[in-house]
Amino acid sequence: DAGVTQSPTHLIKTRGQQVTLRCSPKSGHDTVSWYQQALGQGPQFIFQYYEEEERQRGNFPDRFSGHQFPNYSSELNVNALLLGDSALYLCASSFLGDTEAFFGQGTRLTVV
Amino acid sequence: DAKTTQPTSMDCAEGRAANLPCNHSTISGNEYVYWYRQIHSQGPQYIIHGLKNNETNEMASLIITEDRKSSTLILPHATLRDTAVYYCIVRVSYNQGGKLIFGQGTELSVKP
């Protein structure tokens, strides 16, 4: 049983560009959350998706948007990239309201 | 903002018990204490969680004080592979989205 998978693993983008990161949740999980982890910091909650809708959002600008598909997979989109968006982006999946969230290995985004 | 306070770093001898403390003095009655760990450049890994009672699983034990203002994660026989950053997290209640609010974590170094 595959766990949470994220793609790509690494990505380099230029300031001002747009990027899309992808996440496939653990089999059977219906909820996907995204986190941003800057170097040396703990992960910060971006938003959570359930039933194809954004259920909750952290303190991130509208440049960060997402989507969840009927098969529960999810995308994170970031527009107008800034140098400060360079980070490890983590996807976590769970059953809604369940106790344990499983994390993927993350996508390392570098903005130059 | 994170609702937990942890020491920045700790050392432990291989084979000994590692005791990682955490303060969460503002925890609410329906909020759980979670522990995750993150080995360098990987996604966080769930360890254990609890509400009021002490908990034990195959990885660790969680001791929560009676007033719930602090807790201790115990790795009974630390190995070199337990070297990681350990995050103590107060999980927001389900009705508030259930997001995980990470702090800075404790960097545990297990030494031979």
Image (tube, rainbow, N blue to C red):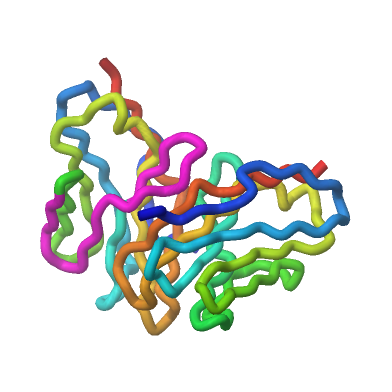
Q: Can residue B8 be seen in this view?
A: no
Name the one closer to the observer, B72 or A93: A93
Residue B109 x, y percent position in the rendering: 34, 27
* Residue A59 falls left or right of residue B98: right
Q: Residue at horizontal 32%, vertical 63%?
A: A100
Q: Where is residue A83 in the image (x, y as percent from the top left)?
A: 79, 47
- Residue A44 included in the magenta stretch of the image: no
**Tag count:** 0
Seen at 29% across and 24% down, the residue is: B80
Quarter location, residue B15: top left
* A54 and B71: which is toward the camera: A54
At 69% from the left edge and 71% from the top edge, which residue is drawn?
Answer: A65
Quadrant in which residue B37 is drawn: top left
Residue B47 included in the magenta stretch of the image: yes
Q: Is residue A67 above or below residue A109?
A: below
- For the N terminus of chain A, give its image quadrant: bottom left
Residue A82: x %, y % from top left = 80, 53
Q: Is residue B62 left or right of residue A100?
A: left
Residue A57 visible at all: yes
Q: Position of A26 compared to B75: left or right?
A: right
Which residue is nearer to you in this view: A20 or A48?
Answer: A20
Quadrant of the drawing holding the C terminus of chain A: top right
The residue range painted magenta reads B36-57
Name which quarter of the figure residue A34 lies in. bottom right
Which residue does the image show at 12% across and 64% down from the upper left? B53
